[in-house]
Amino acid sequence: MTYLAVPIAAPDLDEAADQITEAIAAGAEMLELRTDYLEALSPDLVKNLVTRAKNAGDRAVPTIVTCRDKQQGGAIAHTVQLRIEVLTAALRAGAEFIDFEYENYLDIQSQERIRLALSQSSRGRLILSTHNFKDRFDDIGRLHRRILTVCPPAIPKLVYTANHINDCFEAFDLLHRTGGERIVLCMGRAGLVSRIVAKKLDSFVTFASIDEQSATAPGQLTIAQLKELYRYDSIEGDTELFGVIADPVGHSLSPAIHNACFGEKNMNRLYLPLLVQGGQPEFDLFLRNVLLRKWLSFRGFSVTIPHKRSALAFTKTAGGMVEPLAEKIGAVNTLIVTAQSGLKAYNTDYAGAIDAITSGMGITKARLKRLSVAVIGAGGVARAIVAGLSDAGAKIKIYNRTVEKAQRLAGEFNCEFAGLDELPGLDAKLVINCTSIGMHPNIDYTPLPDGCLDKDMAVFDTVYNPAETLLLKQAKRAGAKTIDGIEMFVNQALAQFKFFTNQNANTELMRKTVVERLLE
Ligand code: NAP
């Protein structure tokens, strides 16, 4: 059983009581009373706070009382004497758990006082915690054993900063190979995923905040995100995992649409945001980490910026299957993990984009023949679109910031190429933005200077967040036809869902989820 705990961090009793009511209403299964945030901290105040927590809401939730040492991330520097008095008072008031720092517990006097307080409590239990706010622990396994050697009945809590998602795997390993009650989590953006996977791997507690402002640790999700976006209540030990490998990943709508469709079909599957920073080596290490650990049950991935070519290279090196179309495009946006921990690689961008263009322009695929097209960008999406358009016989000119990349792509598909400085003179019936220019949060940018578009053109922006980019606004003003990135996004996601599950997703639910998220 994993408790979903919400930290209560307030300067006074009234604000703490409001937070408690909110947390319970939002679905908290446990409260962590961070008493180190209380400004006029005293044992009586904490007694009062615990009593309030016990009587709040319409259901009883267990409480952890923490008075964190400033050295270990505490809010206010209280003396160790006061912190132990506070924990003792909390136990007397009926708190189920007190959290004390393992490093401070090694001090014999502190240890004796904590033991005495616990011996006088009928049900109070000790969480011995340790934090590393900078990095991984030197040897997390040894630290876990040491905590249990010093105090066998304690619940060890080991929390460290993951500077890369690859740092999370030792937390997963520890949870996988140890039994009993233990809390193992990673902090930071790269560690966010550990807060969700904690439930699958049976961590005793995972933490979520009431809202983004009240987060008490970097990378903490809100309770609403955990429950609504990441299907927290349905996560089990055998839940199959999927995810989008990207950097940045925060803007991605893929978790929302795939989880909505998994939820609608009651599937025991979960889709995660996987922030994989770095290039080919870091990408390769991430996939090797995943494939080595069958028990994580990762079954498939969407791959996007900037890893689509890395996904192709890794699959080939690992001896996996690459569909011929993805090989020709030179980019992969979908990976399937086989039962033997092998990989199959696909590209669903190509058909998704061509369908979006033909339906957006109201033409058949045959009418793409000899159509003059300006493709801006030479990355993964550009490759897929150039391959599709070239297959259909269009006349393509590729513009890119790095001209050599445009030249290489043009050489492969027999097109023209230029740098972005030549965009003002463009002469095309269809203009396609395949760069991330204009993508959230940089929504005030456009790849085209004003005055390049006219009413006989169609403009397709593959960026889907926001749905109406500055480029599309320019196009509308010029009277051109516009095609937004949502259509392509939904098309490629439908194809991915089919690869992931062998079933068709609910198209309308996907579209609705994308639009709702964008409106948020
Ligand atoms: P990618 O492989 O990393 O390629 C990025 C492209 O954008 C490169 O051509 C790069 O130029 C260019 N670029 C990036 N920042 C730039 C800047 N500040 N100024 C000028 N050029 C810049 O990425 P990708 O996977 O092709 O994705 C590109 C875009 O497609 C993203 O915005 C993504 O949101 C969108 N997309 C849409 C869908 C959909 O379904 N609608 C699906 C996937 C992706 P250099 O070569 O010079 O670096």
Image (tube, helix red, strand yellow):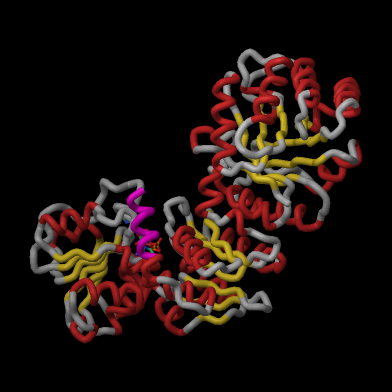
Image quadrant assignment for residue 465: bottom left
Residue 9, position as x, y percentages in the image:
60, 28
Q: Quadrant of ligand 1?
A: bottom left
**Residue 514 is covered by the magenta coloring:** yes
Q: Viewed as shown, does residue 79 lie left or right of 473?
A: right
Q: Residue at x 68, y 41 (%)?
A: 160
Residue 54 picture quarter: top right
- Left or right: 452 with respect to 402? left
Instruction: Please name the predominant secondary structure of the magenta segment in the image.
Output: helix
**Residue 369 picture location, percent across and down:** 20, 84
Compared to residue 124, the image places residue 408 above or below, namely below
Q: Which residues are magenta?
A: 510-520
**Image side of residue 299 versus residue 151, left or right:** left
Residue 121, image x and y in percent?
86, 28
- The residue located at (72%, 15%) in the rendering is 44
| 156 inside magenta stretch | no
Q: Is residue 399 visible?
A: no
Q: Between residues 174 and 1, which one lies in front from this camera angle?
A: 1
Q: Residue at x 67, y 60 (%)?
A: 236
In the rendered image, is residue 378 in sight? yes
Total labels: the figure holds 0
Q: Which residue occupies the extreme bottom position in the image?
A: 366
